[in-house]
Image: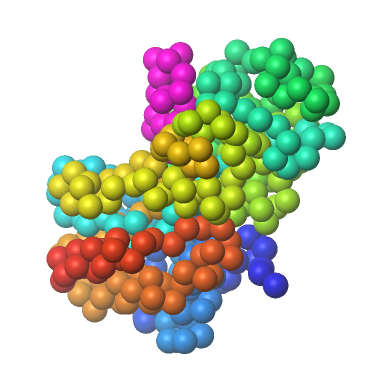
Amino acid sequence: MLKTIAAAMTAVLLAGATANAADITGAGATFPAPIYGKWAEAYKKETGVGLNYQAIGSGGGIKQITAKTVDFGATDKPLKADQLAQLGLIQFPAVMGGVVPVVNLPGVNPGQLKLTGDLLAKIYLGEIKRWSDPAIAGLNAGVRLPNLPITVVHRSDGSGTTFVFTSYLTMKNGGWASKVGSNDAVEWPTGQGGKGNDGVSAFVRQTPGSIGYVEYAFAKQNHLTYTQMQSHDGSFVEPVAANFAAAASKADWAHTPGGSYYMLILDKPGAESWPITAATFILVYKHQDNPAKGQDVLKFFDWAFKHGDQLAEQLDYIPLPASLKASIEHKWQEVH
C-alpha cells in the first residue's frame, strides 16, 4: 500500500533530522513532494544516501538555492534562460503532473462537477459567489448543487502551482489577465490562503462550499472531490494520468529558449488533454562550490530517471520521455 502524502513528506523531512555529510539537501515546490519522498525512501535503501527536502513552495526553493543554503532548488515556475544565465544555474524538469481544482460540496461526487477555464477564473475573481449560480448550474444539468456561498482557497506562499494555475486563468479569461495576471504570488481578489499543496488540501477538506487547486496526488491521497475541466478542444475531461500524459505529449522539449527547458503545458490541443498540466523543475549551479555534492544531486536524479518511473506512476505523476531524459543527462555535463 502507498503511504499517504503526509507520511511520504514526513519521511523526507525526517531524513533531515538525522542528516549527515553524505545526505543531499533540497528545498522548494510542494507539487512534487510526494514523489520526491518516495524516491528518497527507495534511494536511501539502495545507496545509504538520504534526502533532506524542505517542501516550502517554489518561491522558497528559488531563494534557498540562490542563497546557496541547499544543494538544489525545486520550482514549478521555471526560470527563463536569461535568469538562469544571470544566476549561474541550470534547470531541468524532473517529472510532470496535473494541477486540479478540488471542491467540498455536499452531495457532489468526484468528477461530477464540470468547469471551464473562464468559469473558474470568474469564481476566483469573486464574480460568481454561490454554487447555485446559473452559470455553474447551466453547465451541470442534473447535478444537485447546494445553495452555498463559494469559499475560494488559494496558496498563501510563493508557489509554482499558483504560477501554473494563474497562467492558465490568464489564458482563459481577459478580466483575470488584466486585473490579476500570472505569477507565483498574486494579489488575490478574494479568498483564503493555505500554505503548500497540503495546506490548501486541508482547508478545502474542512470547509463546505470551498474550492481550491492542488497537484493531483494531493487530491487523490486526501480523497478530495476533483472537478472535470473543459479541454482545449471543448470536451470535458477528468484529471487522470492518461489525460496528463495526453497533454504532456504535446510539449516540444527539443526547442525551449536557450536550452533552458522552460515549458508550460497549458491548454494543449487534444480531446483528452488535461488543460492544467505542468512539469516541475530542479535548479543547480553550473559551477559548484562543492563539486562532489553537485554530483551527488545529479546521481540522485539519474537514479530517479532510471528506476523511479513506476513510483511516479503510482502517484499519478507522468515520467519524462526517454528522449528528454537523454537530453537532460547531456546537459548535466555543464555541472562541475
- Does residue 130 show up magenta in the picture? no
How far across and how far down the image is residue 331, in percent?
Answer: 19, 64
The colour scheme applied to this rendered structure is: rainbow
How far across and how far down the image is residue 228, in percent?
Answer: 63, 36
Left or right: 99 in relation to 269: right
Q: Quick check: 140 above or below 31?
A: above
Q: Quick check: 69 above or below 57?
A: below
Image point (22%, 57%), residue name: 90
Left or right: 271 in relation to 103: left
Residue numbers of the magenta segment: 163-184
Label count reads: 0
**Residue 26 visible in the snapshot:** yes
Q: Nearer the viewer, residue 104 or 142?
A: 142
How far across and how far down the image is residue 26, in percent?
Answer: 39, 63
Q: Quick check: 321 above or below 226?
A: below
- Does residue 177 show up magenta in the picture? yes
